[in-house]
Image (cartoon, helix red, strand yellow):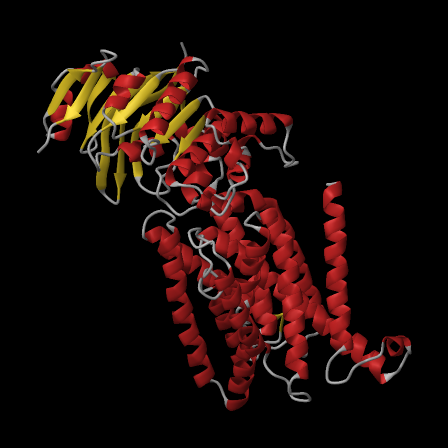
Amino acid sequence: MPGKILPTLLLTAFCLLVLLGSSFLGMTIISPASILETGSPDAEVFWRLRLPRSIAAFFAGAALAVSGMVFQAMFRNPLATPFTLGVSSGAALGASLAIMLGLSTALPGIPAGLCAALLGCLLSMLLVCGITRARGGFSTPVMLLAGVIINFFFSSLVMFIQYWSDARDALQIMRWLMGSLSGLEPVHIADLGMITAMGSLLLSRFTRELDLLLAGKELAASRGVAVQRVTLTAFALASLMVAAVVSLAGPIGFVGMMAPHICRLWLGAGHERLLPASFVMGGCFLVLCDLLSRSVLAPAELPIGIITAMIGGPFFLWTLFKSNRNSEML
Amino acid sequence: MKRALYCEHFGFTLTGKPILQGICFSLQKGEYLSIIGPNGSGKSTLLKCLLRLHDSGHAQGEILLYDRPVRDHTQRELARHMAYVPQAGGPIPPFTVAELLTLSRFPHASHKRAMTDSDQKAILYALELTDMQKFARHRLSALSGGERQRAFLAAALAQDTGILLLDEPAAFLDPHHAAALTALLKRLHEHEGKTVVTVTHDLNHPLDAGGQVLVLRHGRQIFNGPATALACPGILETAFEHSFTYILHPGTGRPLVLADHA
């Protein structure tokens, strides 16, 4: 345990540096001294707009990266992400319905969009698991295929809802589908932070099981892993985190695939190190993407999904070609 | 002597198709069992059923592990009693040999997760037995097929169980390492009292290793008895629908089986 204190402190310091640094930067650069002046416009912008938004971006990126890591380990496939498994589109369907129906608050402190996205996520999970079981057993390729089918089906339903909605709702859905972290209430950020932290903490209990699943389902079972229970628990936790992100910030792509994969190439496949690394990598990456999204075309704002794909794609390809571990499955 | 494994009229059906039917054998603690049969006869399926590795399919009859039904054990309990060496050729796990061996200690791990002295000892002993010390830090993907197979055997040994289940362990090994593997399995069985169950296509392996042999054909058991019975014509011809020549090794005088050319 003492050996973990220094890396934890270093990672925490790095995250704080990124969070604070990105909050000082933007359309205008805020000087560190001005944030302590009560009532100054810079302090207002820093404390009320930029810092909460950076925190939201950090938790959203961390949640997407950790859930991507879990899906990649479970399916032994670097392309297994919340998107390919239909989890994101389930959440998107729920959240789109909430926008179209004009739902605002479901429970005190919990927005209707989050509840609807969670329900959509749950529906996609039930359908994916149901299709997999109906096909016999708990086959990973069948589960992956079922996820792809559900993804396409739910995406078309989202498009249908968009088509069916009035112009204002359709525009709101379209903007939300591109991904944005602007205008989040502190209570939403607190919800997102709590779900991300709890989900990641619970998943950290399964790091050795995820290592063994990476070595193959049969091998994992032969070493004592209750494969079905672990897979379902990890799938549910990862989906919950994705649902929280999608409901609040829209379906932001690439982070869930890229961050854990790059960390794996740097640190190896062991999840004890990979989980905190993916958490930090995903979080910091999305904070930097958010900084770009509000700076590049300022005062206009570029959807964050465009930034993640534009940076993530080439970087991912570069890392992939740099690596020579072709014979391994991840 | 205590009964390690007992199969009583065991059958296994997958998507309505019977894969195994009426399998009966009893294996005492410290005994050696070779499972042979043509391709598709259900050898690997039987091995996986012993460890409850199938996530689908329907089982009939009963498999007892130390006189308790396998289905009543948790997966972790099964892993404390039985270690499995899978058939070579699947995707390569992205780990080093040492990491693979460390993962094999999972069934014995406490909630604190820290490596104990017994974990370290088991890993070092497994590396030594399989002559894999120098490869400990190598990635599995950087090893040859034979070396990787020995790494998986080392991982099973690091699990430190009373029963070893091996699915064609010599498939990728050259004659030198195949002979060394047979010698190692005999040593584990004779000197350390391990119960060994191995699926093999090498028909001389049961004759070398001794113990029992289980011969399967189309998912049915056509023979279960002493491995020496394979040295006499009849069983292999029925199982493989092929003719064989039975000779004695000119040097050692041990019986050998040679498959005739078609």
Q: How many marks?
A: 0
Query: Camera-side residue: A257 or A121?
Result: A257
Q: Looking at this rendering, what residue extends furthest in the right direction?
A: A37
Left or right: B255 in relation to A206: left
Query: Camera-side residue: B223 or A247?
Result: B223
Which residue is rendered at x = 45% and y = 46% of the image?
A: B141
State which quarter of the image contains the N terminus of chain B: top left
Which residue is rendered at x = 58% and y = 57% of the image?
A: A263
Q: Is residue B260 above or below residue A193?
A: above
Left or right: B69 in relation to A55: left
Q: Residue A291 in the image: x percent, y percent?
A: 68, 77
Left or right: B41 in relation to A138: left
Q: Residue A200 in the image: x percent, y percent?
A: 63, 54
Which residue is rendered at x = 74% and y = 61% of the image?
A: A14
Q: Is residue B104 visible?
A: no
Query: Camera-side residue: B39 or A64?
Result: B39
State which quarter of the image contains the C terminus of chain B: top left
Q: Residue B161 in the image: x percent, y percent?
A: 48, 24
Q: Residue A300 in the image: x percent, y percent?
A: 65, 88
Q: Is residue A270 above or below residue A178?
A: above
Which residue is rendered at x = 75% and y = 57% of the image?
A: A12
Which quarter of the figure has residue A28?
bottom right
Q: Looking at this rendering, what residue extends furthest in the top direction?
A: B1
Q: Is residue A166 visible?
A: yes
